[in-house]
Amino acid sequence: QVQLVESGGGSVQAGGSLRLSCVGSGFTYSTYSMAWFRQPPGKEREGVATIDSAGRTTYADSVKGRFTISSDNAKNTLYLQMNSLKPEDTAMYYCAAYPGPVVNALAAWEYNYWGRGTQVTVSS
């Protein structure tokens, strides 16, 4: 079955960096649209960055210029490099997947496979 396992979260000070990873298994990774979402405490889940099977990327305005999504098909691994972190980036970060192209790349309802998340905490 499809499995997504995130890692790399932690606690950092504002201005710091973290690199999240998501390893996929049980599916043909290279044909899927992949994405990172986050859910801050008490708030709804929101799209952060996405990458489709052709390598096209989409970013939320709040992370443009600071976060970079990438994918290594040989390793079935999705990455999110997060630089210049801010306290408002504090959230549980989730990896998501869909078997094909999506229309609304940053919409959670487009994705039907989800990891369990990794916590990112940014202190001021």
Image (cartoon, rainbow, N blue to C red):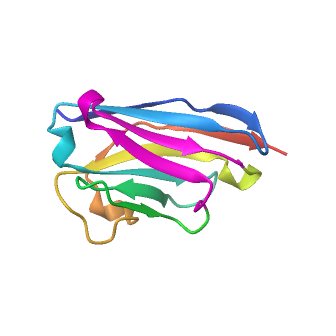
Q: Position of residue 23 (x, y in %)?
A: 34, 30
Q: Quadrant of residue 111?
A: bottom left
- Magenta-colored stretch includes residue 80: yes
What residue appears at the point 32 percent right and 63 percent down from the top-left corner? 109
Quarter of the rendering occupied by the N terminus: top left
Position above or below: 111 against 4: below
On screen, residue 119 versus residue 78, left or right, reads right
Q: Is residue 53 magenta?
A: no
Residue at (39, 34) in percent of width and height: 22
Give the number of marks.
Answer: 0
Q: Nearer the viewer, residue 32 or 66?
A: 66
Percent coordinates x, y for residue 119 in the rendering: 58, 36
Residue at figure coordinates x 55%, y 35% from the top left: 19
Q: In the figure, 115 relative to 56: above or below?
A: above
Q: Quadrant of the C terminus?
A: top right
- Region rendered in magenta: 63-85
**x%, y% of residue 106?**
40, 65
Along the line of sight, the residue nearer the viewer: 65 or 60:
65
Please tell me which residue lies in front, 8 or 15. 15
Q: Residue at x 25, y 30 (%)?
A: 74
Q: Nearer the viewer, residue 87 or 20?
A: 20
Left or right of 12? Residue 35 is left
